[in-house]
Amino acid sequence: MAKKSKHTSWDLSPAPESTGHVDIKKKYDLFIDGKFVKPKSGKYFNTINPASEQVLSSVAHANEADVDRAVKAARKASGPWQKLSRKERAKYIYRIARLIQERAKEFAVIESLDGGKPIRESRDVDVPLAANHFFYTAGWADKLEYAFPNRKFAPYGVAGQIIPWNFPLLMAAWKIAPALATGNTVVLKPAETTPLTALKLAELIQDADLPPGVVNIITGEGDTGAAIVNHKDIDKIAFTGSTGVGKIIRKAIAGTKKKATLELGGKAANIICEDATIDQAVEGIVNGIYFNQGHVCCAGSRLFVQESVYDEVLEKLKFRIESLVVGDPLDKNTDIGAINSKEQLHTIEKYIKAGKAEGAIMYQNNCDLPSKGFWCRPTLFTNVSQSSKIVQEEIFGPVLAIQTFRTIAEVISKANNTPYGLSAGVWTDKGSKIFNLSSQMNAGVVWANTYNKFDPASPFGGYKESGIGREGGLHGLQAYLKF
Ligand code: NAP
Ligand code: MG
């Protein structure tokens, strides 16, 4: 009898391009101390493909005892990892970057299967940017004394890292790369709907021969995250996720030795001034809100258009929305993939309903949607008021709320009037307006005549309820060091 394979083979021909096939194990254990080990909880949960609702794999659910085992492994590895020469640490990080590049296609396909994002985005944005984060921090790992001259510093020790489902591999890279470069060890938990690329990264870390226990990747649900946050022997928490959970974490660690970086929600304003190049601005608005189905913390979910160009912008925007292709994430022509989960689809639908109930006017691309899976047509609302739910709250879906303005003072006051302050966009032909607007906006990142541009050298993070601390660049390394 043929031996039963532990792997499910995904034959992806003919779509997309020549991806060949990727191997996804039917079952994944926890990655602790350099090995995959069975969870003490004995529990597993399924991760599905949100475009088909098919089960992709069964994944371990770590409980408190499992978290404790992972933290102990990270603690044991911490001393030797700190003593290793910085040059040696840099080599490991560089090796991880190279291996991500070598396996880029496999990572991209798994990311799109597990999370629903278009393969074009996984392939061109998520995976290369994840590799670049490791390259960037590898470059700093043996030069930290030049980055922070005349200052004494040391790593915190063990970092507990919790990430969301919208950029699973990229968020893992944002977290792991700076922690390693600064001499910390890691216990990381990916989101429950998208654990597979983090687990592939665990396999890659094994192949890179990283010393056991330096990186531990444990899967689970919210309770696993809470067990990491509450574990007594963790020195630093790095969390990316919703503002709601961020508040719970802040309370949980108050009065403890733990330091925290919290990267939370957003409700970005994208502002089109009357002197902007309108076609370029419309393209940027579409990218700003519909990229990754709007599952983006810095999504340009509010649009402000100066009154004199409003009709032109709206007409062009509607025309452009009609041309967006919604469907199979693995088709390289797809613009809008699947919504990440049934729960997230319900949340988005609730906001669309609320928008209509509040008197806003809805416009949607009227394409057919696949019969299985979770889908949402690209949507925009006009006639919205500043106090409405769809203007004030993060929807985290492909839903744009459009308002108008007459003066710069008016738009700044409206743009700043939400609990968030993560990012913003300005579209204008006048450099002076860019400086004027960006200096008055409460936003950690302001893009001008472009949107959603990321670079490992740039710090990223929010004002107000969008978070505490910065990731990326030297700021991101500093967040893992005590001075
Ligand atoms: P979430 O519900 O807050 O979950 C984020 C992570 O925290 C997941 O791994 C989640 O596990 C875990 N978690 C849930 N409850 C927890 C608890 N009580 N204690 C500790 N961990 C807990 O957020 P999400 O829905 O995954 O992600 C969307 C949010 O992330 C949006 O608000 C978005 O704006 C934000 N985000 C921010 C940035 C940024 O850089 N500022 C970047 C990306 C996303 P489960 O998955 O198992 O529930
Ligand atoms: Mg999934």
Image: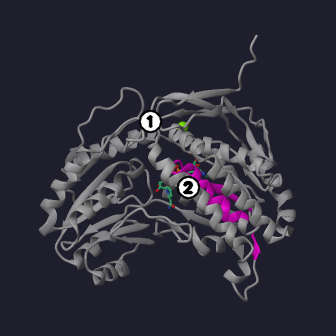
* Residue 259 pos. (x, y %): 67, 68
Question: Three-letter amino acid code at disc 2?
Answer: Pro
Q: Is residue 4 above or below residue 62?
A: above
Residues rendered magenta in the picture: 154-180
Q: Quadrant of residue 147?
A: bottom right
Q: State the residue position of label 1.
A: 342
Give me the residue at 52% from left, 37% from top.
18
- Was residue 421 drawn as part of the magenta stretch in this picture? no
Q: Is residue 377 visible?
A: yes
Give me the residue at 71% from left, 47% from top.
204
Question: Three-letter amino acid code at disc 1?
Answer: Lys
Q: Is residue 14 above or below residue 338?
A: above
Q: State the residue position of label 2.
A: 128
Q: Is residue 441 above or below residue 186?
A: below
Q: On the picture, is 442 further left or further right than 139?
A: left
Of label 1 and label 2, which has the lower sequence position? 2
Beta carbon at label 1 within 8 Å of ligand 2? no
Q: Quadrant of residue 108?
A: top right
Q: Is residue 263 above or below residue 336?
A: below
Q: Residues within 10 Å of mark 1 (few under 14, many from 20)?
A: some
